[in-house]
Amino acid sequence: MRVSVVVAVLLLAGTASSAAAQASPDTAVVAMDTASLASGRYARMSMRVERTIFKVDVLELEIRFGQEDARRFEELAVGRGYSAQIADSIADVAIHSQDAFARIVFIRDNVSLDQFIDGVREDLGYARLDGIISPAEYTEISDSLPIWFGFLEARHIRKGDQIHYRIRGDTLHTKYQAVSGEILLDHLEVDASARLAVLGSYYARKSSFREGLVKSVFEN
């Protein structure tokens, strides 16, 4: 059974080169500074992802944005309803954000490494098709995913696990936090392509997330 849990976890497989990105449980974890993020209706998008023919909930995703992005979302959305044209404009702003925080909470137990990687590759592929990342960047990230997320092979994703991404400029800070609180991955990357891979996978035209995220701007 294939589960499209998508990008949530691109954890920069494509650009990082050190196994040190996987932190031991007792490693000190740098707190993510979210003080610059905006508040209010146009500063946040969220959705719940369901997959499989049984409509099983897989994850909840929330993305928060900085002041400038929130202002632009408001200009695009206020007084309007959802449309394909407006969705294109909102997605373009989101893809190129340099002040964002994404939080994924898994709400289903026992998602396997293969299911997870299949989902990530699918949405990453849409970012490649839209020209957000290059074919070479897609291949590099895709080939690295089994290495980065190898800890899921025996453990699997568990209900309550979380992934956090903090984007500031071209810096991407990623954490995978187990439901127990243990940090299984803690990595800081400075690379525009890594930032674009994460946001592009959420907002590419055929992404599993794009429609739900953009519609939430009009529903909040």
Image (spheres, rainbow, N blue to C red):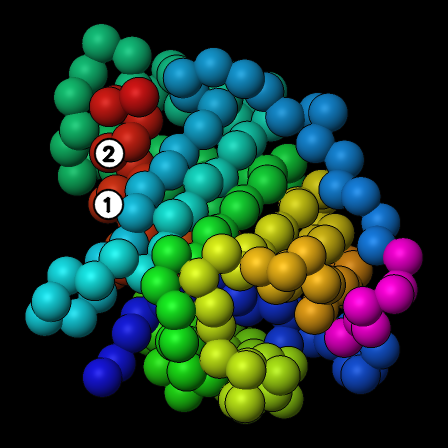
**Where are the magenta residues, as a range?**
22-28
Local SS, label 1:
helix
* Location of residue 64 in the rendering, given as x and y in whole percent from the top left corner: 52, 33
Residue 78 appearing in the image: yes
* Location of residue 16 in the rendering, given as x and y in whole percent from the top left corner: 74, 76
Residue 88 appearing in the image: no
Q: Amino acid at mark 1?
A: Glu
Quickly name the residue at label 1.
Answer: 211
* Location of residue 148 in the rendering, given as x and y in whole percent from the top left corner: 64, 81
> Is 42 colored magenta in this rendering?
no
Give the overall secondary structure of the magenta segment: loop
Front-most of residues 31 and 203? 31
The N terminus lies in quadrant: bottom left
Query: What residue is drawn where x is 39% and y is 69%?
Result: 109
Quadrant of the image occupied by residue 80: top left
The C terminus lies in quadrant: top left
Extreme-top residue of the structure: 79
Does 136 appear above or below 173?
A: below
- State the mark number for residue 215: 2
In this image, 26 relative to 205: left or right?
Answer: right
In this image, 124 relative to 34: left or right?
Answer: left
Does 78 appear above or below 181?
A: above
In this image, 25 relative to 139: left or right?
Answer: right
Local SS, label 2:
helix
Query: What residue is drawn where x is 37% and y is 38%?
Result: 46
Q: How many marks?
A: 2
